Image: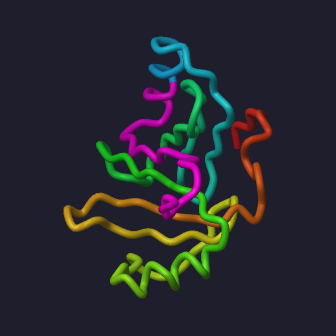
Amino acid sequence: MAPPFGPLRFLYIGTADTGRDLKFFVETLGARKVWRFKEFGADVAALRLGEGPLVLLADHRKAPSVMPIFEVKDIGATAKDLKRRGWRPKGGKFEIPNGPCYLFEDPSGNEYAIFEDVRPHAFEDETEPEG
């Protein structure tokens, strides 16, 4: 049986201080900053730590927390199939830069998200805006 989701694309990490944590990841760990945006009252930075998902430091998420965000081929079909098996999203569908997204929790309260990449590579152009 195939896994229910596609690739793990982002690890969304809560931070109490984006600048401080960004400096740690870049200067201490040697991560590469992909971008940083300060918009809509949020300070979010993307880092490349290795192969796999981008690490997103976000000051609008509580620290400590880590939310895996998985890509799916068809958000509507995936949600419909999951709902038939008892899955319930936490709130309604919303948009992230790459496309429509659902947030959900496991029985222990850990948060996850699934999204459909209708705007591929929306923020992965390797630019470094400091909005």
Q: Residue at x 68, y 32 (%)?
A: 34
Residue placed most toward the observer, 109 or 20: 109
- For the view shown, which residue lies furthest in the left direction? 108
**Quadrant of residue 21 in the image?**
top left
Is residue 80 within the magenta segment?
no
Q: Can you say whether 1 is above or below 54 in the image?
A: below
Label total for image: 0
Residue placed most toward the observer, 73 or 17: 73
**Quadrant of residue 41 in the image?**
bottom right
Provide the residue span drawn in magenta.
Answer: 1-22
Residue 91 screen position, x and y as percent: 42, 80
Residue placed most toward the observer, 60 or 51: 51
As drawn, is 23 to the left or to the right of 74? left
As drawn, is 32 to the left or to the right of 90? right
Q: How is the image coloured?
A: rainbow
As drawn, is 74 to the left or to the right of 70? right
**Quadrant of residue 49 in the image?**
top right
Q: Can you say whether 4 is above or below 43 in the image?
A: below
Q: Residue at x 52, y 85 (%)?
A: 80
Q: Residue at x 52, y 38 (%)?
A: 55
Residue 119 screen position, x and y as percent: 77, 61
Q: Residue at x 70, y 43 (%)?
A: 131
Is residue 10 within the magenta segment?
yes
Residue 4 screen position, x and y as percent: 49, 64
